[in-house]
Image (tube, helix red, strand yellow):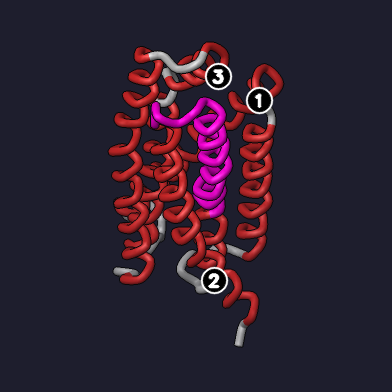
Amino acid sequence: MDIGLSLLTLLHLLIPIYWLGGDLGAFYSSRFMIDPARSVPERMMALKILNNIDMAPRTTLILAFPTGFGLAVAKGWIDLPGSAAILVWVLGLAWLALAWTVHLKHGPAGAGYKRVDIAVRYVVLAGLIGSGVAGLAGAIALPLFISLKLLALATCISIGLLVRRQLVPLFPAIIALRENGPTPEGDKAIAGVIAITQPTVMVLWVVVLIACFLGIATPV
């Protein structure tokens, strides 16, 4: 029994579990945040819980590629040396540390880290799309299911970037709620942002499930 390969497989299997589980938790917490019947402290606590739970899908999104790439190399699906998998892991963990820094640093202190994180996401997005399309076109030697999973992960990153844009109006509304208390206009703005983002997140869930199916079906 190859314990290392088994542990890597287990870690990769845990990715969609914590991804979807975290998203469901954030989805549920948002209900309390937009509820005008709740007090401001309760709504702020719901927002804090939502932000913390949301780090589960943010973390698993970043780890999806290193775990999958490591498995592909270990199982011979990709003809690359083990050092390539190690390099991907190092880069992935560096990105993960950056994402957690963005989460922990608020306001101006985290602005620079946030810009770097967004830039990294666009670079990774371009790499995933390029590799996935090249694999489908036969320009590089990739199994079909890996090419499709790369494009699925690229779609997840794209949806994540879209959600960030959709959430932009939420932040001034939250600040106004915390500092001035609830108003009909503010409650409407917060509920409107959540109403827009929730269908987008549901699309993300579907893409994650498709990626899981591809990993199980492994079409040649």
Q: Residue at x 29, y 44 (%)?
A: 203
Q: Amino acid at mark 2?
A: Leu
* Quadrant of the image containing the N terminus: bottom right
Q: CA distance from mark 3 to mark 1?
A: 16 Å
Q: Residue at x 48, y 51 (%)?
A: 22
Q: Count every numbered label the image shows and give the total.
A: 3
Q: Residues within 10 Å of mark 3 (few under 14, many from 20)?
A: some
Q: Which residue is mark 3?
A: 178
Spatial CA distance of label 2 from label 3 is 42 Å
User: Depth check: 174 or 161 in front?
Assistant: 174
- Residue closest to the eye, 190 or 59: 190
Q: Kindly identify which residue carries mark 2.
A: 10
Looking at the rendered structure, the kind of residue marked 1 is: His
> Residue at 56% of width from left, 35% of height from top?
45
Compared with residue 26, is residue 87 higher up or lower down, i.e. above or below?
below
Is disc 1 placed on a helix, strand or loop? loop
Residue 6 location (% of width, % of height): 57, 77
What stretch of residues is rendered in magenta? 34-63
- Residue that mark 1 sits on: 106
Residue 140, given in percent of the width and then of the height, sits at 40, 54
